[in-house]
Image (spheres, coloured by chain):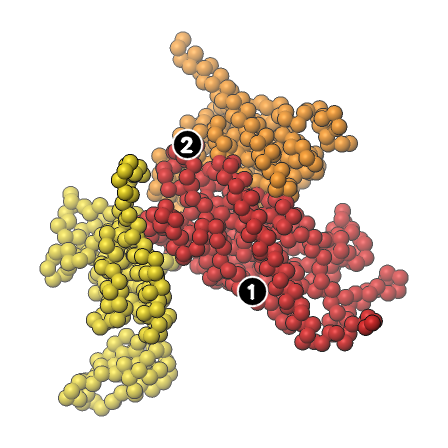
Chain colours: A red, B yellow, C orange
Amino acid sequence: MSRNTEISTNERTYFIEALKCGLRLDSRRFDEIREPQISLSKTEFGYVELDWGLTKLAVRVSAQIGKPYEDRPFEGLFQINCEISSMAWAHFDNSKNSNEEILIARIIEKAIRRSNSLDLEALCIIAGEKVWNITVDLNFLNFDGNFVDVGCFGAMLALHHFKKPDISIVNGGEDIIVHDIDERQPVPLSILHVPICLTYSFYNPGNKESNLKGEDDDEIYLLDANLIEEQVREGSIVVTLNKNRELIQLSKNGGIPISANVLLDLSFKSMKIVDELTELIKKVISKHEKERYEELNLKMLEVGADR
Amino acid sequence: MSGDLIIPGDFLPIDTDSSIKTTIGPGIYKNPQTQSILPTNAGLINIQKSKAGTNQLVYIESNSKRYTPQTNDFVIGIVTGVIGESYKVQLQDFSPAVLLSMMAFPNATKKNRPNLKIGQAVYARVSEAIPEIETELECIDPTTGKEGGFGLLDESGYIFEVNLNFARELLFNANSIFLEKLASKCKFEIAVGINGKVWIKCGEGIKIEKDRVVPEEGKPVRDNTRDLKSTLAAAGFLVKCQKLRVDQIDAELQKQFKNI
Amino acid sequence: MELYSPEGLRIDGRRWNEIRNFECRINTHPNSSDGSSYIEQGNTKVICVVQGPMEPALRSQANSNEATLEVNLSVANFSTTERKKRSKSEKRMVQLKTTLERTFQQSVMCNLYPRTLIRIDLHVLSQDGGMLAACTNAMTLALIDAGVSMYDYVAAMTAGLHDQTPLLDMNGLEENDMSTLTIGVIGKSEKLSLLMLEDKIPLDRLESVLAIAIAGSHKIRDLMDSEVRRHGNIRSSKLAS
């Protein structure tokens, strides 16, 4: 079986010509992302299904108790696991060796784990012995471009949604009791900041040499490329920002060169979308919380004076 | 009867009288030992009886996305390479490549070879489709020996993919409403491959400009984007039509051609 | 030990806009390879060896339109202060390798060598910050030495941010503590071919860090260029006589 897709010259030409006229094949603006469709699980904490155009992702966060690293006895453990199989697109190999898959996993890991978005010290139970081990499993179900942005958004959403069981320490630190969720309300994770990744793809309508020599500056940038846009693209850059105007990471793995001014410009423009997406996460989670509150009639469990 | 849903394992609702000659089509399998006929695909059954009642035709209309080459099918393929004296052509993503001999063109000789580049699309006929060996294509009309509409598809048209069922509908159904409705909005040229690929061009399509044209002072800028937009709108319309009911088609057509 | 004293001196005595000692040599392995180079940026030492364009070992690597670049990056176990075994298939290594491959795919004129493979082997002998930048510079020089056609130099440099001050050319200690930006610049332009930032910096400080990094890259390009010309002049003088 051929593991290849061929884009015909016809499609490629139409695509580039449409870009030159300011049109995108799916009628979005150049700096418009697709609308994410979120569904949070009502029964389990930490399970989220995310649809971003035709790209589909299922995320699950799970927690276990384990031993911390020896050189970091106060910190919990946190892993992000990306599962990209040929279910998402026949082009992906089922073995994990493809460079593309490793790049995607690395960028998501850098954005979330390396930037300390999850407070690891809050995961500590008994220093040096028992800590929470949080694992985020990203299962990519369908590929229509842009796994990085979707993966990062989905992971942050699931981490917000997840609640770990409440624990009590008895016998002076000897034993830990893990309370069932029916016994005691589970506890949300402590998230320090919300990184949002944005991928810009670029296309060079002119010829290669003038772009490299720096004379022409008319490359075209698209935000959130879909499948065909990704296959035809000549370069990409992933910008990860959070709401506090902090640049978490920047990654440009080859592709046609871009000028520094354009880079700065894109980063500043991205802030608006980052704000919107962060708001979306907060809104969806708080709506879900409220619904749960009403459904389970948690008001009765509240201990507080009614005065 | 005709138009009923049938699934492998069901009995075929046909006349098993031995005096009636039965012709079977796609989706039906005749067991060579027992001579019994069985449905092998899930879909809508289609039974046609001749007026005299002596002949009947039975086949199953099913939908799929993966095309298997059959002899005498007209397909659109994309050239992906050269192997020896043939072009390697791909009919669908992730399908095995098929061969298009360089001699299978009108007026082709060893000295006079066609000049196809990688990425170009051709309209061809499947000449040999034996499952055990590599399928072969031809770009020559078998009866006349001339081009007959086959050959390179112009680079100014747009290519997109549809389900096999829809491709068959566009190609074989002379009363297809989709193309009629589209004709009311723009003039177009269309080539339908039964492997699900469709080539379409409204007006002149794209004018491929080798160098960027600097607009001259005082002259209006040539608007060749209108054809490009029409072509993309037509393609979008046909793709969306696969999932719409008949009454929604007009609305979709209006929506696609809104800005033109 | 403070990374940046109030008088404006860093741990190694440099100012904020000074690069480390930069040494480079080309054609260091004339017998074993088509092109080679050796780069020292402070204590970071990298050897690069290029073979090609040559017949690809695997049929799948033969691209009918352009050359395929294969980069093998091996970091020596003794390269850091503590001996540590590194696997080649570690995610970080694969990412760096892919980044280098893709960066050079653009600046090497690959369409002039279809159906061939250009194999580049990088050996990092000593790491003290700026590994990716040193590897990029070494690759540029080795490809020039091998005679592979390129559009322009790709000069790479690191820069970081300490509080409000941008610092140029980070060494190992600084890299561990501060966020570092690695960029690869094409020739004398301001076009970035390679870009990697792995830790947080405030968005509003990006411009200053980028500016000093680009200036640093131009300086490196000049240093590499003068070495290449020096080497070229020596060889041409041998021809004349």
Q: Chain of mark 2?
A: A
- Name the residue furthest right: A172
The crowding category of the residue bearing disc 1, from other C-alpha atoms within 10 Å (few below 14, some 14 to 19, many at least 20), is some
Secondary structure of the residue carrying numbered label 1: strand
- Name the residue furthest top: C241
Q: Residue at x 61, y 60 (%)?
A: A281
Q: Is residue B60 above or below residue A81?
A: below
Structural distance between the alpha carbons of marks 2 and 1 = 44 Å
- Residue B185 x %, y %: 26, 62
Q: Residue at x 33, y 86 (%)?
A: B11
Which label number is shown at residue C8? Answer: none
The residue indicated by pointer 1 is A38
Secondary structure of the residue carrying numbered label 2: loop
Q: Nearer the viewer, residue C129 or C235?
A: C129
Q: Nearer the viewer, residue B69 or A162?
A: A162
The residue indicated by pointer 2 is A215
Q: Residue at x 29, y 43 (%)?
A: B221
Q: Is residue C193 above or below residue B7?
A: above
The N terminus of chain A - image quarter: bottom left
Do discs 2 and 1 belong to a common subunit? yes
Residue B125 sits in which quadrant? Answer: bottom left
- Residue A176 x %, y %: 81, 64
- Under mark 2, the amino acid is Glu
Q: Residue at x 48, y 34 (%)?
A: C191
In this view of the protein, can residue C89 be seen by the observer? no
- Name the residue furthest front: B218
In this view of the protein, can residue A173 be seen by the observer? yes
Total number of numbered labels? 2
Q: Is residue A289 above or below residue A109?
A: below
- Under mark 1, the amino acid is Ile
- Residue B83 x %, y %: 28, 48
